[in-house]
Image (tube, rainbow, N blue to C red):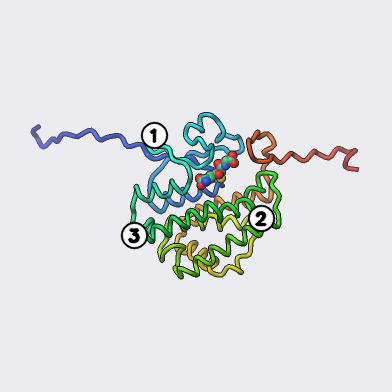
Amino acid sequence: MGCGASRVEPQPVVMPLTLYSVSDGPPSLAVRQCLKYLEVEYNLVNVDFGAGEHMTPDYAKKNPQKEIPVIDDEGFYLGESNAILQYLADKYPKDETFYPQDLQQRALVNHRLCFNLSTYYRNICEYAVAPIFFDYPKTPKGLRKLMIALENLNTYLQLTGTKYVATDNLTIADIQLATSTACLEVINFDLSDYKRIQQWFETYKEENPDLWEILEAGVGELVEFSKNPPDLSHMDHPIHPIRQKKPKKTEETAM
Ligand SMILES: N[C@@H](CCC(=O)N[C@@H](CS)C(=O)NCC(=O)O)C(=O)O
């Protein structure tokens, strides 16, 4: 080809990643913070939890567990927020610290992710979050479980003596554990008995304002819902006990 013209090779069309998320869902908020940290562009699709959109056959094709979040990376669907964070941090490595390659550091990060899933978020969710939406009682045992989980994290922070939960740098594990910790705001939980957690959580907010902005907004929605619980009485849920609408007081019953 002459005259300085150059052949333009056709570029493969790269579809951006799609995240199916719910704006006040802690696992979704964790994925959004991870994408923000990694500076990855993506399509955000808000799933309507109240309308049960995540329980439709169409959604089940994306995530057979019928849970939010799920990502679609050019037809590769992945649920479970821990797995999503691990995948994204490996696919878009921004630095060597966010999901370290060092065997033992990575093992600690993975341990903290497992601890969050099995114990920390689970107990916080059962006591603070699930009762906002469904008819779950807040029991003394639930509170004990929550406090044991907090003691565990406090001890882990003490044992490593690190600024963040696994190393001296922010890792994907901090994103999950900070997201769970933020949910305690729903019950106005005083963290002053857990000094290490308090200190680490403050560091998280201060050093990662972009991430905190996402988390604060999502948890703010939860706080609002806790004051004014949504009416999900229309929902036919396979597991959660649905809170029935309080019958309106008629003149007769009001007397
Ligand atoms: N272990 C999953 C949990 C996801 C999850 O439970 N998400 C909630 C929304 S915050 C959900 O979709 N629940 C389904 C339901 O309650 O019907 C993860 O980390 O991604």
On screen, 209 above or below 193?
A: above
Which quarter of the frame holds ligand 1? top right
Residue 114 pos. (x, y %):
49, 53
Point 46% across, 63% down: residue: 165
The image quadrant where one finds the N terminus is top left
Residue 208: image location, x then y, percent: 45, 60
User: Which of the two marks, 3 or 1, is nearer to us in this view?
Assistant: 3
Residue 125 x/y as whole percent: 60, 51
Q: Nearer the viewer, residue 40 or 129?
A: 129
| Residue wearing tag 3 | 102
The answer to whether one can see residue 8 in this image is yes
Q: Identify the element where label 3 is drawn.
A: loop
The Cα–Cα distance between marks 1 and 2, rounded to whole angstroms, is: 40 Å
Q: Which residue is mark 1?
A: 75
Where residue 123 sits in the image (x, y, percent)? 60, 54
Residue where numbered disc 2 is placed? 142
Amino acid type at mark 3: Asp
